[in-house]
Image (cartoon, grey):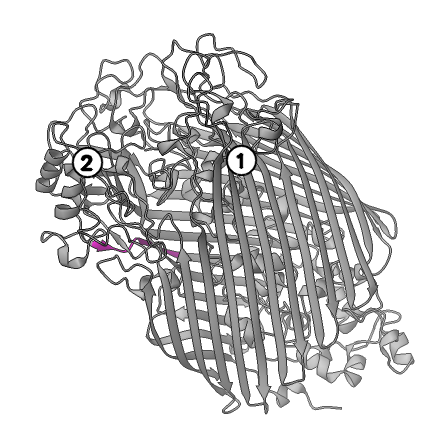
Amino acid sequence: QEAPAQQEQPAQRGSGEFGFRHVWGDEYGRPDLPFKPDVITSKFNEYSDVRSGFFIRRFNMNFDNILGSKNYVNLQSQSSIYKNQSYLATFGRYGKFKIQFRYDEIPHIYTNTARTLYTETSPGVYTLPLALKTSLQAQSAAAKPAATLPFFMVSQVLCGIAIPPATQPPSCSEPFITPSILRKAGTGTVSYYVTPDWSIYGMFSRENEVGSRPIGALLNSSPSASATAGAGAELPEPIDYFNNTVKAGTEYGKKDWAVQLGYLGSFFEENISQMVFDNPFRATNEDANDPLTGRMAMYPNNHANYLNFAGAADVTKYLRLMATVSPGWLSQNDAFLPYTTNSAINACGSGTQACSSLGVLPAPSLNGSKQTLAMNYTLVTLPWKKFQIKAAYRHYDYNNNTAVHPFTPAAGDVGVPDVTSPTDNKPYGYNKKNVEVTANWFFGKRDSLKAGYEGEFFDRTYRDVEHSVEHSFISALDLSPRKDLLFRFAYRYSNRTPDSYQDDAASDPTTGAPVGCTSTSVVFTGDQRCHRRFDEAARLLNRADASVEYDLQRFSFDGSFQTIQSNFNRAGGTNSPTPLNFLSGAAATTAPYYLYGALKDLSYIYTFDVNYTVSNEVSLFAEYTHERYYKRMISRNRSPTSGIQTILTCTGCDSANDDWESTYHDIFDTYAAGVDLYLGKKVYLTPYYSLSAGKGNVFSSALGDPTITTGPNAFVLTGTSQPQNYPETTTRIHELAVVFKYHLTKNIMPKLEYRYQQFDNRDYQTSAMTPYMGCIGTKSAPVMGCPSATANVGIPQPSAFYPGFVVGDTSAARYIFMGVDQPSYRVNVVTATVEYQF
Amino acid sequence: LAGAGPLVAEVPSDTKPMLASQASKGNPAGYVGTETCLGCHPDQERRFRNTVMGKIFANPRTELEKLGCESCHGPGKAHVDAGGGKDTIPLRFGKDSNNPIEEQNAACLACHSRGNRLFWKGSPHESRAMACVDCHQVKQELHVSLASDTRYSAPLSENRGVKKPQPELCLQCHQMRRAQLQRSSHMPYREGKVTCTSCHNPHGTPNPKQLIQSTINENCLTCHTERRGPFLWEHPPVMENCANCHEAHGTNNPQLLKVRMPRVCDSCHDSSRHPTTPTLLNAVRDFNRGCTNCHSRIHGSNHPSGNTFLR
């Protein structure tokens, strides 16, 4: 007999890996920028902190039987002293108790191309120099030609916006910022087995989240921020949160049953309650349409408390009952801010006090209150050995007890609130009940057949559909003709039907009577009478899954296919029974549709995975995934009438001839391949490569007859209203890694690693972003008032990926952005470390 | 919270005399005692004693634990009488076992039926004949291939009882998720700050998608607490289901959106005011953050003038 293994192999106490790394690379694709963004703050480090220098990759240490006791200590760390560091310390006795402390940091960098004219003078207060505001006010005065503002912005205010650095304004001083946040969380847990059958536990966690992220703020009620009206600014939203979480619970059980009782409390604190920012275009003479400042409410403090009762018991040898009841209470009672900072707006509430006064509010705070109740009851029975039946009932109640108050908002801190028709808050709530009955026949060791029914009964308040039912039929088949081969198939069919669909805004503006999908009323309704929101609409859903696993001793292959197909385009029921297309027959430009909104949502996914162990020294793997996503929606271009007109007397304000279609295509290909080499029991070598390639397209087209130019069916989808395809977006993430390890001694393993990562990003929405987009036009159509394309060649080419194509909105001439982008990058990382085991 | 159970146990390494102390004296009928097993299987013992189970069995708390090897493998008398042989072991685990998966799992559940396994019976993995040992291992060191090691980081954990670290363990079967995790817009999975069991309990819960919390939203709001509300002005699809707009496992669109702006909004808001227009490429409603350039409080606003989520 062998000697005791304890003497043969002294236990490892722990290990640590530390060393140096060197990081270099560059960002590319933004030659228009007047500065070179730092690759260290690029998307490469979006959630991490990889920098040159000494680092401790990981550390792990164990001590058992401390001082002769039965207790142990375990210490672990990862990425020590960097911003993504983690630590875990545990003290306990196996099977008896455990005390654990965890500390984690998670960075999140949003962008490294942002600049702002604003200065945060105190937490949440963003100001601009008075002289600058005065100049901008003068330049955007209504009396001035509108064209002067864009020129002034580009040539005198903002740095290097689409302008070659040599021609930048001399006063350029726009600071460069890196909006990012850092989460720091400490968590302590204690668990204790009072007896083998009875345990208790407790946990407290406190997380601090600090930093900023970009946010848009409009000084207007609509997106218009033209050269003379409205204004907007993108700002770094201040983040200073605390999340406190408390958990406590106990469990008691015997062989055939157990009960659990638990409490969870979650308390969110925001230390900055509001964000106040200067209107860049107004320094003096505040009026109802030009406030001096804007003010946004930050997320309010909130509390959530949940109780949980759970239990399970084998009622008989063949019947198990499981249940949970979990009530929750959500509350929020932060003091309201005034309607506006704009002292020139005087008609809120009763109209007797300025809207900037708290006195006109219907309540000092919301006193928001919700109660949730989750209940689950599940029975699993084995009527005979190979047959299992499951019956489950689930009830989830989201009950909103918040009071309703009348408000008279001053949208965007401008305009005159409608005091005659206050806007009520809508305490939205819902109740969902689910039933499930499934049967499983296990006819072999890994062979089974499953069939069943699921039903969902959904009730909502303050939504378009008050009640809907979804019936689902599910089936699955697992076949294992031999122990190393397994086929799995699954299919689901679901049919969701709302009892009725009525958007309150799709009603007669005079009588308030609902205007249904098939109504012949000619009034212009606030919302389209036949629009359907996809999360409430009638839907047929088909889902199919198939997979194969072939697993030999040295070779394995896995493949799978999945498709999910949602079809909202159903005739009749709550939709139109007849096609809504304006054109039909041979003239039709698209397939029939019976509603407005999402019609189809389809996905097809294929995966393949191969592993081959050539020998004890060499193994290979390869993976490939192909995904296709397709969505289709229909909308109608509608223009509100004057009030006395109907859809028959105005020109093309609500006609099917102005319907348009948009389809959305996403395609992803993901590849990975690598080799593990283990040579001479001393050397490990692993080359590895992966590529995640995605591209997306949004196609849009008009569906009507463009030759009709007059009358109620006039085709108006022209000019700035014409549907157009958007440029393709692509992201490609390459990663190549080569890892070399050498077993120098039993305890020491030097490691050399090279990693190359490349991110190619072509996103028309951000790849051209600069702080001022009001002066960006195509080369063939320079924006009036901006430096001409010939004089400033940088203007029409802000993105190397989109030569000749740029985005920018002259109607947003008074919107100052930050130029948020995540440019493409190439990064090389060489790491030399030593892993030491002790 | 459902299924949240005790966190006691775990931790590898170091040695401690154990199975040998479980002598065969006074064994129940058919049981031979651990010492007899060790006579032929010293290697197994050496590996086992460095596991958490091994350390717990060193100081058995229950009658079942006192049975040592036979507490999992069943009474060994027939095996001993036959002079060994795999087929005479009453209960063996893994793909080569002749025992039904239900029997294999029952042996594990004899001790591990509580905590977050309370709802294992009838769960998706149980009903598709998944064996505990498909993911867990009792007598093996954690295997981490170098190639896998270079691809994903994992949160710090004491759990050494699984065959691979997360997320690689789950991705063996859920291959499409592997592709999604590698997309440009993602939560910090690859960086090892979030992993599968941050949201899901693979042992089963009574909740949708085996989520730890009761609903998708309760799950998301565990970390994104600022968006929980209640708010004065709420956006109903947001309060109902974050997954109406977001794909948590990764997308190519900013903010994990399923569809990029402005179409993600247009698919519902297709009927009034400015959303009814197709929106030119160069419009402020399209570039940068699209609709949320202005409606930036789309998750809810507590500002009295925030009814259209501008404030």
Residue at image location 49% in from the left, 12% down from the top: A522
Q: Residue A816: give x, y in percent of width and height.
A: 24, 42
Towards the viewer: A700 or B103: A700
Classify residue A427 as left or right of residue A138. right
- Apparent side of residue A727 relative to residue B88 in the rendered image (left or right): left
Q: Position of residue A463 (x, y in %)?
A: 52, 25
Name the N-terminal-most of marks 2 and 1.
2
Please provide the residue range marked out in magenta: A176-185
As drawn, the label of residue A633 is 1
What secondary structure is marked by label 1?
strand
| Residue A270 visible in image | yes
The amino acid type, in three-letter code, at marker 1 is Met
Q: Is residue A178 magenta?
A: yes
The kind of secondary structure the magenta stretch mainly shows is strand
Mark 2 closeness class: few <14, some 14–19, many ≥20 residues within 10 Å? many
Task: State the residue at coordinates (26%, 57%).
Answer: A32
- Answer above or below: position of A741 versus B111: below
Give residue A693's position: percent from left, percent from top: 50, 60
Query: Which of the two residues, A599 or A349, is positioned nearer the viewer here?
Result: A599
- Using the image as rendered, state which of residue A61 and residue A773 is in the foreground: A773
Q: Nearer the viewer, mark 2 or mark 1?
A: 1
Check disc 2 and give the amino acid type.
Asn
Mark 1, residues whose alpha carbon is within 10 Å: few (<14), some, or many (≥20)? many
Q: Which residue is mark 2?
A: A279
Tell me: B185 left or right of A65: left
